Image (spheres, rainbow, N blue to C red):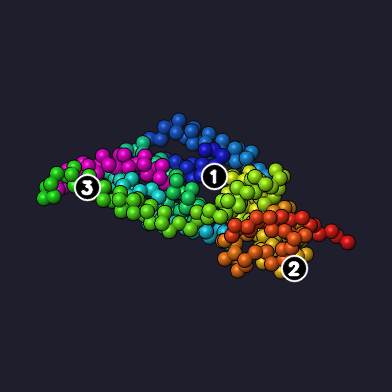
Amino acid sequence: MLTHPLSFLVLLGILLGLFLKTLEHKKVERWEWEVLTLWGFGGLWFHLLVYKNALLLHGFAALWKNIPGRFLWQEFSSFSLPLAVHAVGIIPLFYGVFAVFHILHTRRESKLFPAVGIFLVVLVALFLQMVSAREGLALLGVTVVLLSSQGMKWFSVYVRKVQIRQVGSWEAFSTIGILVAFLLSSGVPSVVAAATAKDVPSRALLEAVEWIGASAPQDAVILALPEEGFLIKYLARRGVAVDQSFMLVKNPEKRLGEVEDVFSAVSLVEALDSLEKLGATYVVVSDVAKRRFGIEGLRYADDHCLPLVFDNGVKVYHVRCRVVAS
């Protein structure tokens, strides 16, 4: 946990929680400050060890994983309230938010102030797009689950006080409400997402990747779209010219430009120059690449320098030529 950037959000959240505790004239124990200080310096030290090269190479851009501008908005702007409800679940989210309001309103349960602080810090970071929706919601979900158990208890007491008698016992009413809310917030979106999934690799692409794993040399470097890089790494166990991890890429925008040149080029010499810079020995043209670049295959491919070695709709080319400087 100390080596993950989210550890600093947790640290800020705990610090905010202790600050709220101080505002309510609650005593902050000495061990709490000691743990906070140890976590802060320990986290900073671990980050300097693990991310030293990335920090020296990219500076503050490393905070955003050195993601190129064209992908940055996809990574950090996808947060929305419906997404939070679907990812965390409407039941724990409701009880978690109820617990936060109850703690801030009654000024009780000072032991939960750090959890409230983490909840508020992560929520602000998500709305300000300072953390990716995937990672932020993961941390928010853990915090909400911790708070929701207490929130459920307080809500039960509250329901007993208002005495909902005309609908029957409050237990039956709550059970029915929970089941309906669960189906609407989790079951239905999951079915819709499964039916309309766009990011699932096609069968043709999976077959092409399996062929690469069985036929390409171990030292082969595969060029495909960035979003297909991890799939090839995992299934084919071959190196890739580019994927969606840019932490140790010196100039990601330039590298992505070279990838685009390979797919959109008309001249073989121009494409071979980009392939040489990327170090690629195979090129995969998937259905997604065809739609994105408006091609059916590499326009400059030939049987000598860039032969087609696999084709099931997804085309795989073998790079056999290199540009030699005169």
For the view shown, which residue lies furthest in the right direction?
326
Instruction: From the viewer's perspective, tell me whether residue 142 is left or right of residue 181.
Output: right
Residue 142 visible to an observer of this rendering:
yes
Check if residue 214 falls in the magenta segment: no
Which dot marks residue 159? Answer: none
**Of callouts 3 and 1, which one flags the residue occurring earlier in the amino acid sequence?**
1
- Report the residue marked by disc 1: 5
Element type where label 2 sits in the image: loop
Q: Distance between the residues labelled 2 and 1?
A: 43 Å
Q: Left of 317 or right of it: where is 304?
A: right
Could you tell me if the residues under marks 3 and 1 are in contact, i.e. CB atoms within 8 Å? no
- Magenta residues span 140-164
Which amino acid, mark 3?
Ile
The prevailing secondary structure element of the residues shown in magenta is: helix
Identified by mark 1, the residue type is Pro
Q: How far apart are marks 2 and 3 (CA)?
A: 66 Å
Q: Where is residue 97 in the image (x, y as percent from the top left)?
A: 33, 48
**As shown in the figure, which amino acid type bears the numbered disc 2?**
Ser
Q: Which residue is located at x 77 percent, y 59 percent?
A: 305
**Quarter of the image with the C terminus in it:** bottom right
